[in-house]
Each structure stands twice: as structure tokens, then as C-alpha cells.
Amino acid sequence: MKIICSQESLLHGIQTVQKGISSRIGLPIYNGILFEANEDNKVHLFATDLEIGIDCYIPAQVIETGSTVIPSRIISE
């Protein structure tokens, strides 16, 4: 996955979906944010705590499609 986007858009997306993350769940996958880059020049961000899920789409130039989960504490620092 390789994208180009504005810092403001990325920050807005991260701050939006972080509200769906809970530290109460012991599985590491639920402490992260899912990033999915698609051909439609948007990046889908998603987080859940198994009770609620929050997603957000940000505009980006998608050079290479793909997906990954990045731990919330790493991406927010």
C-alpha cells in the first residue's frame, strides 16, 4: 500500500476513528486502525471495540492498493 494525502486529512481521519478504540479488549487487533487504500483514490480508516465501529474515508492519491492495521498508539504519536 502506498498513498499520498494531506497531513490534515490523515489527522482528521485518525482522530475520528480513534473514538472507536477501547483498551479494555485484550486482542491487539482491536487496538489498531485499519487502513484500506482502494482504486477510487480514497483511503478507508476503520476501528472498533466490538460494540461500535467507526469508519472514515479520506481523499488520497493511491499509488498502490492494499490494507494494513497500525496500532493506535503508534499512529497517534
Image (cartoon, rainbow, N blue to C red):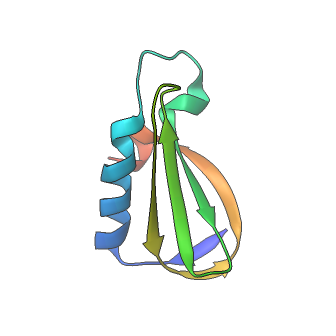
Front in this rendered view, residue 4 or 25: 25
Which residue is at a point 68% across and 79% down the rendered structure image?
A: 39
Q: Which quarter of the figure has residue 18?
A: top left
> Image quarter for residue 58?
bottom left
Q: Position of residue 65 (x, y in %)?
A: 70, 72
The number of numbered badges drawn on the structure is 0
Side of 30 where 14 appears, left or right: left
User: Quarter of the image holding residue 66?
Assistant: bottom right
- As drawn, is 46 to the left or to the right of 8? right
> In the figure, is residue 43 to the left or right of 59?
right
What is the quadrant of the N terminus in the image?
bottom right
Pinpoint residue 49: horizontal percent, then vertical percent.
48, 28
Q: Is residue 55 above or below residue 60?
A: above
Task: State the residue at coordinates (41%, 49%).
Answer: 75
Percent position of residue 47, x then y: 49, 42
- Classify 37 as above or below 14: below
Identity of the residue drawn at 33% across and 39% down: 19
Q: Nearer the viewer, residue 55 or 65?
A: 55
